[in-house]
Image (cartoon, helix red, strand yellow):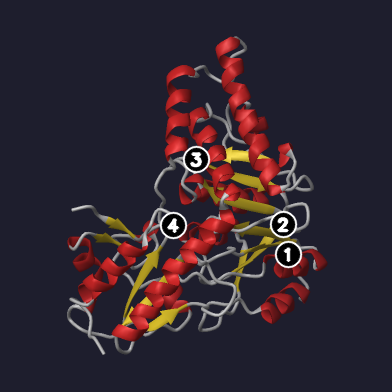
Amino acid sequence: MKRIYFDNASTTPLYKEVKELMCDVMENEYGNPSSIHAHGRKARSIIENARKTVAHILNASLGEIFFTGTASEANNMVLKMSVLSLGVTRIITSPTEHPCVLNTCSYLKTYHNTLIEFLRVDHLGNIDITHLSSLLSTNHEGKTLVSIMHGNNEIGTMINLDSISDICAKNNALFHCDTVQTIGKYPIDLSKTRVSFLSASAHKFHGPKGVGFVYINNDNHIIPFINGGAQERNMRAGTENVAGIAGMAKALEMCYSNMEDNRHYIVEIRNHIKKSLTEKFRDITFNGNQENNFLVHVLNVSFPESPKADLLVPNLDMAGISCSSASACSSGVEADSHVLQAIGHDVARKAVRFSFSSFNTMDEADQLIAALEKFTPLR
């Protein structure tokens, strides 16, 4: 039985071309990029060409792109180093952020006395822009960093990136945006959007695991996150993951060259599943914004309380379909989703996240609906 994968918000399949490139780099270009001999220079050129690719796609300068191991590392770098080197004494964020942001904020509050303020969100997960403006207009000693994700990994609600960046700029606040769910899927022009920091992870856009990047605007100079050698222009010590970085740049290039076609295809699959769910099953609801500003590859569905619904994810797993009920970083933790709690979700209803990519097919969508018919109440 060929398994069906509907958990692309957790991670995505590797593009074939990315795998081939990485295998070639690992086999033939194994030099240490810090070495001055030919092998090292070749490895260094691979890294710098990848940096050029990423910078070109995002319309950033080369000196603003730094490679990391993960987006969680990138987010930690931005939040912690902003406090330690930029004079940030207050962080404004939302209760629906990824755990790597929320837990880092908790750490900074405990060990660095950083003031953490949470924005109000509505029942769809939309950020209260008026509340943000109000918080930023209050007198506060020291700098403020606003940290809000571009698209929510659990319910798919998106922010208006330009609107929030403008509000932050007008109030002299730094703005960090976690774009893990949107890089490679939506156009981002950093020459026009006033973002101080931006983070991304390769495995969310058909690249390899274990590599990501952080954009740091040239106006902001933070101290190194990892001390040691001079890698990444003294910002992140340690020998670089040459094959991973090359693979990430290749994946990003492929995503943006096919972005519109991929999005249109994914929308068709999403709409087909959503329509089938609405027609066949009773008393279901869709979590997050469904009308505008939402991630087209994420569909979070709440099913009515029932014995089978409580075991929906494992039942689908046994039926050969992979999906999830929360962020992958929270898997195995017996707790309700903090995102759904923040938007007032009825905990008695089982929420399941289906997330899609261009690797999925309409036939797989039909197989999902057929499997759900065995486990959930029909109309």
Q: Which mark is residue 195?
A: 2
Q: What is the quadrant of residue 176 in the picture?
A: bottom right
User: How many residues crowd around disc 4 within 10 Å: few (fewer than 14), some, or many (20 or more)?
Assistant: many
- Left or right for 257, reference 31: right
What secondary structure is found at the residue carrying circle 3? loop
Name the residue beneath numbered marker 1.
Answer: 165
| Residue 310 shows in the view | yes
What secondary structure is found at the residue carrying circle 2? loop
> How far apart are the alpha carbons under marks 1 and 3?
26 Å
- Left or right for 36, reference 190: left
Q: Are marks 2 and 4 in contact (CB under 8 Å)?
A: no
Name the residue beneath numbered marker 3.
Answer: 211
For the residues carrying marks 3 and 4, which lies nearer the camera in this image? 4
| Residue 101 shows in the view | no
Q: Are marks 1 and 2 in contact (CB under 8 Å)?
A: yes
What secondary structure is found at the residue carrying circle 4? loop
What secondary structure is found at the residue carrying circle 1? helix
Q: Are marks 1 and 4 in contact (CB under 8 Å)?
A: no
Decide which of 156, 333 is in the foreground and name it. 156
For the residues carrying marks 2 and 4, which lies nearer the camera in this image? 4
> How far apart are the alpha carbons under marks 1 and 2?
6 Å
Name the residue beneath numbered marker 4.
Answer: 357
